[in-house]
């Protein structure tokens, strides 16, 4: 099985089949797929806006390094991160790689 924390995104990554998707999502605690399995999302809570923005900046570093970018919904004390590979029309391993790396951020522990 792929170590999601060490993996790098592949621009040619295919959509995940149902079995692979289930196996990989089991490695991503807190990340929830939408009903159609086209995206995964997770809400991260914080004590204040400063912590929220530190987290957002850390997510931006991962996005830049992986060249795979999430949708972010940013508020005063929370940020919801969503991943989907729009060019493929659903979930790829790239989404799961980035989700794992975001979930492992020290900033992700929030408040």
Image (cartoon, rainbow, N blue to C red):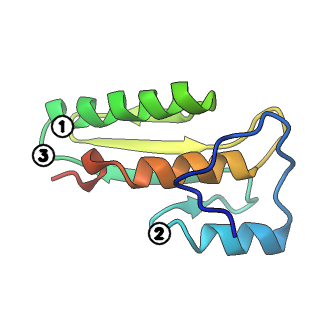
Q: Which numbered disc flags the more N-terminal residue, 3 or 2?
A: 2
Q: Residues within 10 Å of mark 1 (few under 14, many from 20)?
A: some
Q: Is residue 71 left or right of residue 90?
A: left
Residue at (65%, 58%) from the top-left corner? Answer: 34
Residue at (83%, 70%) from the top-left corner? Answer: 18
Which residue is label 1 attached to? 51
Q: Which numbered disc flags the more N-terminal residue, 2 or 1?
A: 2
Which residue is label 2 attached to? 29
Q: Could you tell me if the residues under marks 2 and 1 are in contact, i.e. CB atoms within 8 Å?
A: no
Q: Quadrant of residue 23?
A: bottom right
- Label 2 to label 1: alpha-carbon separation: 21 Å
Number of disc labels: 3
> Residue 10, how many percent across, how many down?
76, 39
- Label 3 to label 2: alpha-carbon separation: 21 Å
Residue found at the very far front of the displayed protein: 6
Q: Quadrant of residue 76?
A: top left
Image quarter (top left, top right, bottom left or bottom right) of the N terminus: bottom right
- Label 3 to label 1: alpha-carbon separation: 7 Å
Q: Could you tell me if the residues under marks 3 and 1 are in contact, i.e. CB atoms within 8 Å?
A: yes
> Residue 64, how many percent across, how many down?
53, 24
Q: Quadrant of residue 78?
A: top left
Which residue is label 3 attached to? 47
Q: Residues within 10 Å of mark 3 (few under 14, many from 20)?
A: few
Q: Judge whether 22 appears above or below 50 on screen.
A: below
Q: Nearer the viewer, residue 86 or 62?
A: 62
Callout 3: SS: loop
> Residue 97, how many percent across, how many down?
60, 50
Q: Point out which mark residue 71 bears.
A: none
Q: Is residue 65 left or right of residue 46?
A: right
Callout 1: SS: helix
Q: Residues within 10 Å of mark 2 (few under 14, many from 20)?
A: few
Residue at (71%, 73%) from the top-left corner? Answer: 22
């Amino acid at each position: 099985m792929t170590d999601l924390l060490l993996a790098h995104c592949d621009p040619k990554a295919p959509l995940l089949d149902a079995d692979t998707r289930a196996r990989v999502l089991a490695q991503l605690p807190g990340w929830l797929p939408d009903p159609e399995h086209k995206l995964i999302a997770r809400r991260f809570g914080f004590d204040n806006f400063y912590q929220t923005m530190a987290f957002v900046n850390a997510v931006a570093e991962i996005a830049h390094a992986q060249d795979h970018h999430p949708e972010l919904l940013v508020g005063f004390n929370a940020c919801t991160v969503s991943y989907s590979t729009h060019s493929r029309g659903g979930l790829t391993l790239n989404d799961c790689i980035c989700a794992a790396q975001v979930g492992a951020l020290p900033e992700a522990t929030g408040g």
